[in-house]
Amino acid sequence: MHVKKHIRKLWTMQRQRAFSPIRGCLCLLAGWFLVSLPALADTRFVSTNTFLPESTPARDIYYLALFALTVTGSVFVVVAALLFYATFKFRARKTDPDHEPAQVYGSTQVELAWTVIPIIIIVVLFLTTSRIIFAIQDAPQPKDDLKVTVVGHQFWWEFRYPEYGIVTANELHVPLSTDQHPDTTYLTLLSADVDHSFWVPELAGKTDLIPNHPNEMWMDPQKAGIYYGQCAQFCGVEHSKMLIRVYVDTPAQFQSWVQNQQKPAVDDPSVAAGKNIFMTEACVNCHTITGTQAKGTYGPDLTHLMSRDTIASGSVQNTPADLRAWIKDPATFKPGCHMPAMQLSDQQIDQVVAYLTTLH
């Protein structure tokens, strides 16, 4: 509060012309910095970065962003320089007369400049942006490249691989694209309920998932690793925890993952009690486990649940302890999610967890 009081005092002194406008502006900026410093110091590192593109669409967007920042930054520098010049040149002085100086209105040259130059800037930005948009949208689609159907749900992601007969959730696996073996992934975007938006900044731009209106996007990741994203369209209570993980695998890793996902669910007799609870409770109405009577489609496919690093759309690590807490009360991690607490006893939860942890 003492910093804000100091700023108000500086502003009062400025209005009373106790010191020059330039010194006043500098002091005001210093005061703002002191007020903002605690918030700046508390900033957390985030793993998504628009300025680290690893795919062709993301790289095109990156260069467009740099161009737009350069243009708008130049405009800012020019306007700020003129503002500071005018503030210094025409500042109030003690020797000035009490009455206002003669007022001069109108300048054809200045009015033409501030009309024509912005129009040119807007046209250049518009044409550049349009070229990038059409270059991304109209890119050819080779028939042999990977195609994935993405379905947005409240509040999780479903990924279908029609070519391989795979259905998984929240963690998208795609192959690495190299100069020797270019491999592009094409996504068909659908929504099961409300508007969502698929956004992994380092791989591609935002694309909306709109009910009854399929959209498309593509990516060709050029560096192996994990890339993080999120639903970028407010879709309800747990929108902020509708996270995305994209695993960019080498060709060998991707084929190994595909082969594992194509296997039927593990049927381990030692966890029959947990399986029986799962199959006789409401779990089967929402979830699918291949090879069992669980055929639900409202929730994520659990056939290979333990092959995923996270649950709850990336909100929670996929460990037995977190899985147990999730089953006991999903609202503990994700208030507002559509999965209810099943009111199972501690023993029943332990048995269900024992069964689910066999689903690799």
Image (tube, rainbow, N blue to C red):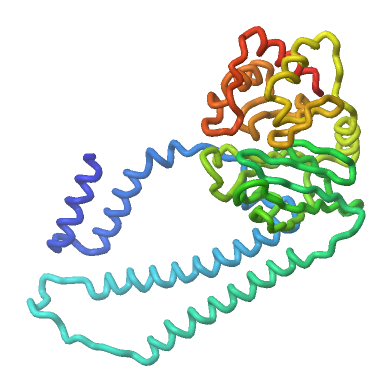
Is 325 on the left-hand or right-hand side of 190? left
Is 53 on the left-hand or right-hand side of 332? right
Answer yes or no: is residue 304 visible.
no
Image quadrant in which the C terminus is located = top right
Expressed as whole percent of the image width and height from the top left, the position of residue 255 reads 90, 37
Q: Check the image and report above or below for 82 versus 163.
A: below
| Residue found 38% across the figure and 38% down from its top | 38
Residue 347 quadrant: top right
Residue 350 quadrant: top right
Q: Nearer the viewer, residue 202 or 277?
A: 277
| Residue found 80% across the figure and 38% down from its top | 167
Q: Nearer the viewer, residue 212 or 178?
A: 212
Expressed as whole percent of the image width and height from the top left, the position of residue 83 reads 34, 71
Q: Nearer the viewer, residue 212 or 160?
A: 212
Expressed as whole percent of the image width and height from the top left, the position of residue 118 reads 48, 79
| Residue found 33% across the figure and 69% down from its top | 84
